[in-house]
Image (tube, grey):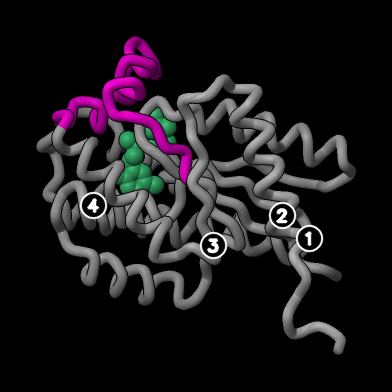
Amino acid sequence: MQQGIFISLEGGEGAGKSTQLRSLSNRLRDAGIKNICTREPGGTAGAEEIRNLLVRGDAARWTPKTEALLMYAARQEHVEEVIKPALKKGVWVLCDRFADSSMAYQGIGHGLGVDKIAALNHWVLGDFRPDLTLVLDLPVSVGLSRTQGHSVGENRFEGMDTAFHERMRQGFLSIAKANSERCIVIDATASADVVAENIWKAVIAKTTKPDPEAGS
Ligand code: TYD
């Protein structure tokens, strides 16, 4: 059986990831492609418990290292229990944030270091990574104004200052540049319909690309 495709959505606060995830999921379903939507941190009962430790409370609650380890503890559960089994069954997995968020937030935003996160990532995931990553990009001020009043209680990361969010935005853009075969930057300032259309085009382009190793 053909493996499912693993797509992650990344971006700063208020980029509209969850709306776009639902929209992509519906469109794939209408095209006859089985898919599941999931999120990080979270996605399994245990990982959702870890999520609660991460997204609630004071911004200074955890040291950046602890935060990174908790993210990867949740990710390990999620990958082994949900993502890999679904892909194996041919089901596509759409994930609201994945490992690039750890690189941007913990590695770059918090200054833990790109090398440290890369090493942790390699230990936990090996070579496992999304087939396609959609980076929803928009100015920090626009994103933060969109999130005001959202997800009551889950605001620990929204308590970070603007400079943190700016570092993180630049982090996502540099990750996308360094991994251009996997990542596509999508302008998230456009209307939700236009963003959805651009995402759809990116998914089609990625999944219909001729395989250079096939045939000939
Ligand atoms: P999420 O619920 O996706 O928040 P939002 O969509 O509102 O931005 O993610 C919760 C927070 O966790 C988010 O602020 C980013 C942060 N995060 C990390 O710092 N590192 C990670 O590896 C992940 C997956 C998320």
Residue occupying the point 69% across, 49% down: 203
Q: Does residue 45 appear anywhere in the picture?
A: no
Which quadrant: the N terminus? bottom right
Q: Mark 4 points at which residue?
A: 106
Comparing marks 2 and 3, which lies closer to the viewer? 2
Q: Which of 50 and 138 is in front in this view?
A: 138
Q: Does residue 65 appear anywhere in the picture?
A: yes
Q: Do the residues labelled 2 and 1 touch (CB within 8 Å)?
A: yes
Could you tell me the amino acid type at mark 4?
Gln
Q: Do the residues labelled 3 and 4 touch (CB within 8 Å)?
A: no
Label 3 secondary element:
loop
Which quadrant: the C terminus? bottom right
Separation of residues labelled 2 and 4 (CA atoms)? 31 Å
Q: Are marks 2 and 4 in contact (CB under 8 Å)?
A: no
Q: In which quarter of the image is ligand 1?
A: top left
> Where residue 75 sits: x, y (%)?
43, 56
Q: What stretch is highlighted in magenta?
A: 135-162
Instruction: From the viewer's perspective, tell me whether residue 145 is left or right of residue 207.
Output: left
Could you tell me the amino acid type at mark 3?
Arg
Separation of residues labelled 4 and 1 (CA atoms)? 34 Å
Classify residue 138 by image quadrant: top left
Q: Mark 2 points at which residue?
A: 205
Residue occupying the point 49% across, 76% down: 127
The first of marks 2 and 3 along the sequence is 3
Label 1 secondary element:
helix
State yes or no: Cβ of the residue under disc 4 lies below 8 Å from any atom of ligand 1. yes
Relative to residue 204, is residue 15 depicted above or below? above
Could you tell me the amino acid type at mark 2?
Ala
Q: Mark 1 points at which residue?
A: 208
> Where residue 67 sits: x, y (%)?
23, 50
Could you tell me the amino acid type at mark 1?
Thr
The first of marks 1 and 3 along the sequence is 3
